[in-house]
Amino acid sequence: STTAAFWGKELADGGKVWYSKAEDWWVHNCETTIDGVLGGFGNLDPDDVKQSAFFFRDVRKLCAQMKTPVQTERCLDGGAGIGRVTRNLLSDLFQVVDLVEGNQRLLDAAPQFLGEKLSSMGDRFCSTLQDFVPKEGHYDCIWTQWVVIYLTDADFVRYLRRCSRGLKPGGIIVIKENMLQADSPTDLLKDEDDSSVTRSPRLMKHIFKQAGLEMVLERPQQNWGSDMLPVQMYALRPVEGRKQVSQ
């Protein structure tokens, strides 16, 4: 397929250039501010947070109706940066939020950035998502936003499988990410500057299926600028009986 051909070309060296280019970009191009972590679009933060909160509320309602309630004890913020999503959203939804972030400089800035929300911060892990292994049966929610664009398809699947094993009973995975338009003729669009890929909805759903996940709810970010890539929110959970699927 064209997707396989794309990755065959990009990862011919085993993936060294793919990941080092993205890591270098974050080292040299990101101030430890909301505007910095949102690539100059800090003004999008309030609406992003508001719609994420509505989405999570509706996911919890749905899961309660399905007799698989989502608890609110502990969450993992995947690709947390300085803790923007933790401070402005997750700390209001969960008692404790752990942060995983591949850039030590951003992670070091999190305690000061969190300010009055610091009491919600649990553990901090400096790790890339392609290498991170969540503690098994530990989280009610693993929230990963605006970061899976940096993972290869294969590493994205493996990350989701490890996240599945990191969930408590009733736990969910939330992916919020830039997307290609539903009618896009291609499944992948590469950004040459930072080695990232925006995926089509059909490729995202294929990856979720590969990872043994089922959809609880999906929803687009509303009232998003027409000059911006569409953003989609997905709430996912392991398909019954497939939680222990191997890597």
Image: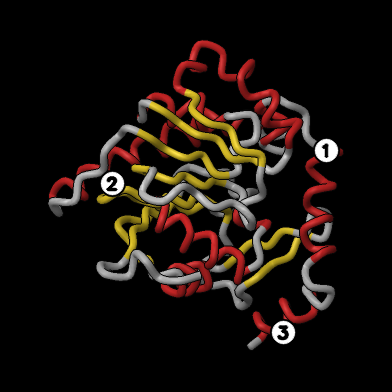
Which residue is tagged 1? Answer: 29
The residue labelled by disc 2 is 59
Residue situated in front as seen by the camera: 180 or 57: 57
Q: Residue 99 placed where, x, y %?
A: 55, 35
In the shown orientation, is residue 201 left or right of residue 236? right
Rendering coords of residue 141 (x, y %): 38, 44
Compared with residue 3, is residue 172 higher up or lower down, i.e. above or below?
Answer: above
User: Element at badge 3?
Assistant: helix
Please give the name of the residue rendered at 41% of the width and 51% of the height, measured from the top-left corner: 136
Residue at the spot 65% in from the left edge and 80% down from the top edge: 3
Mark 3 highlights which residue? 5
The answer to which quarter of the image holds residue 111 is top right
Residue 161 x %, y %: 46, 63
Q: Amino acid at mark 3?
A: Ala
Q: CA distance from mark 1 to mark 3?
A: 30 Å
SS class of the residue under badge 1?
helix
Nearer-the-camera pick, 193 or 119:
119
Residue at the spot 37% in from the left edge and 53% down from the top edge:
235
Q: Amino acid at mark 2?
A: Val
Amino acid type shown at disc 1: Asn
